[in-house]
């Protein structure tokens, strides 16, 4: 059990750093989706099944989709990330 | 990092994060009974009264008994988290429904109308063929999750999100949201919200307390149990599904 | 031991999100870091209610006695509300960002405190 928790924790921390320091915005949004899904897995391990299904359907799917839609509409208006 | 200000901000943020980490670590591993978090016994918490359904009346001597198939509890739902969300703390859930409504309305008012861009690619034939099938399955799964919130994990919020995902699939297959559909979704969402408030007011009229139960609690573990909890959670599921579908339609845009 | 690992993971997410909100320049990245912060806080809340050996809070068999055999259901109920509210605020913030980009034609915060 602690092996799962520790590996998911390391994955989440690495993913969080990747969200901040990654160069491309689309990669950052995708990595944020991965962190959200990993947290849903942690919720399952903590026996919080309602919270897990809510986080997986709202946090991992809908929030990531909303970010991608906004990025697409920004690029429609002429935004390019030059960072 | 180009300017001196940026380096200072980075260093300041690092120091703040390190200080917070040290402070949190000291607080969590403290030995005082009110402060330390690692040894807070789950058994002796007040939320045990939510588990044994002895919130409104004191627990009997020798401990309470809750079993599937039993009757006469003050809340007949088998899923205790659903009982807390939709019966014991339904006022917090009402506030949360209000926040979601404000956010969805704000998005509908603020988001700019999208001009159709020149390079619209159509989805592949696989996606266009598979989407109606998957949408049908997703709608059934979402409805099941909403309706069985008091028996298994799930409930109104996650089921509503799954139903909204079914509508999002249509947008992925290239179907633009039309204004008549958005008006229908908005009307459905408002009707569900009003019905939720009406249920609370009926409870006020019947028993003198907002959201008091006016239906029998039933047998724990069966489908017809929990009193008005099923009605409340189903209305919340309809409202959340309509709201999230409208929100996604606003973000996707298009005529 | 497991509770320590859970609390450390949740705190790592919270502190990384906080660092990102303070130091990033791009508004989309700031919103992503804010969402990481909220996810970390939700994890922290649920991990307070966790105890090893307890079951999920759904009544499937007869339970007796003053000692509850389940994990704490109260933080889970609060976190359910918190996740949905996080989505609402993120969507509204992104709508405001889209409007702001139309008016200002840039998405970065330049000097300290100025998003001109």
Image: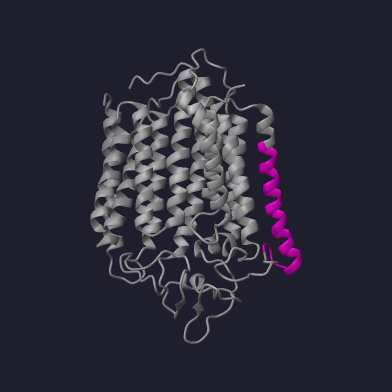
Q: Is A31 left or right of B112, judged from the image as shown? A: left
Q: Is B253 left or right of C105, judged from the image as shown? A: right
Q: Residue at x 47, y 49 (%)?
A: A54
**Quarter of the image where one finds residue B73:** bottom right
**Quarter of the image where one finds residue A29:** top left
Q: Position of residue B187 (x, y in %)?
A: 70, 39
How many numbered callouts? Answer: 0
Q: Position of residue B5 (x, y in %)?
A: 30, 29
Give the residues drawn in magenta, as a range.
B185-211
- Between B110 and B191, the one nearer to me in the picture: B191
- Between B121 and A23, the one nearer to me in the picture: B121
Query: Is the stretch drawn in magenta largely helix, strand or loop?
Result: helix
Which quadrant is home to the C terminus of chain B?
A: top right
- Asked whether residue A3 is drawn in magenta, I would say no
Q: Residue at x 53, y 60 (%)?
A: B82
Q: Position of residue B193 (x, y in %)?
A: 67, 48
Is residue B9 in view? no
Q: Residue at x 40, y 27 (%)?
A: C109
- The outermost residue toward the top is B118
- Between B9 and C36, the one nearer to me in the picture: C36
Is residue B144 in view? yes
Q: Position of residue C83 (x, y in %)?
A: 47, 48
């Amino acid at each position: 059990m602690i092996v799962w928790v520790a590996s998911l924790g390391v994955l989440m921390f690495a993913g969080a750093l990747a969200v901040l320091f990654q160069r491309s915005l689309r990669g950052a949004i995708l990595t944020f989706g991965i962190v959200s899904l990993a947290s849903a897995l942690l919720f399952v391990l903590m026996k919080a099944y309602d919270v897990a299904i809510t986080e997986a359907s709202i946090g991992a799917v809908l929030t990531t989709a909303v970010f991608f839609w906004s990025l697409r509409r920004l690029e429609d208006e002429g935004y390019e990330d030059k960072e | 990092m180009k300017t001196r200000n940026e380096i200072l901000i980075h260093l300041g943020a690092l120091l703040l994060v390190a200080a917070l980490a040290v402070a949190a670590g000291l607080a969590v591993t403290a030995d005082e009974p009110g402060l330390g978090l690692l040894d807070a016994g789950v058994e002796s918490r007040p939320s045990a009264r939510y588990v044994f359904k002895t919130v409104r009346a004191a627990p009997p001597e020798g401990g309470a008994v809750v079993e599937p198939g039993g009757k006469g509890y003050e809340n007949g739902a088998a899923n205790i988290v659903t009982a807390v969300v939709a019966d014991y703390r339904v006022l917090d859930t009402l506030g949360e429904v209000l926040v979601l409504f404000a956010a969805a309305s704000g998005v509908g008012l603020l988001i700019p109308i999208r001009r159709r861009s020149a390079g619209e690619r159509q989805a592949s034939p696989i996606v266009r063929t598979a989407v109606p099938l998957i949408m049908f399955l997703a709608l059934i799964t979402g409805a099941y999750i909403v309706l069985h919130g008091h028996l298994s994990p799930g409930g109104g919020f996650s089921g509503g999100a799954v139903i909204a995902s079914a509508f999002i699939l249509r947008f992925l297959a290239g179907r633009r949201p039309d204004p008549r559909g958005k008006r229908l979704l908005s009307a459905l969402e408002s009707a569900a919200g009003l019905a939720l408030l009406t249920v609370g007011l009926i409870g006020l009229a019947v028993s003198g307390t907002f959201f008091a139960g006016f239906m029998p609690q039933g047998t724990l573990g069966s489908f017809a149990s929990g009193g008005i909890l099923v009605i409340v959670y189903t209305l919340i599921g309809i409202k959340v599904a309509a709201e999230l579908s409208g929100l996604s339609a606003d973000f996707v845009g298009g005529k | 031991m497991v509770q320590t690992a859970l609390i450390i993971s949740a705190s790592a997410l919270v502190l990384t999100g906080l660092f990102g909100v303070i130091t990033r320049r791009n508004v989309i990245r700031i919103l992503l870091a804010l969402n990481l912060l909220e996810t970390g806080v939700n994890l922290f809340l649920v991990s307070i209610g966790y105890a090893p050996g307890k079951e999920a809070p759904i009544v499937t068999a007869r339970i007796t006695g003053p000692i509850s055999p389940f994990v704490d259901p109260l933080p889970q109920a609060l976190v359910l509300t918190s996740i949905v509210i996080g989505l609402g605020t993120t969507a509204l913030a992104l709508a405001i960002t889209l409007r702001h980009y139309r008016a200002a034609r840039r998405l970065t915060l330049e000097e300290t405190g100025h998003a001109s």
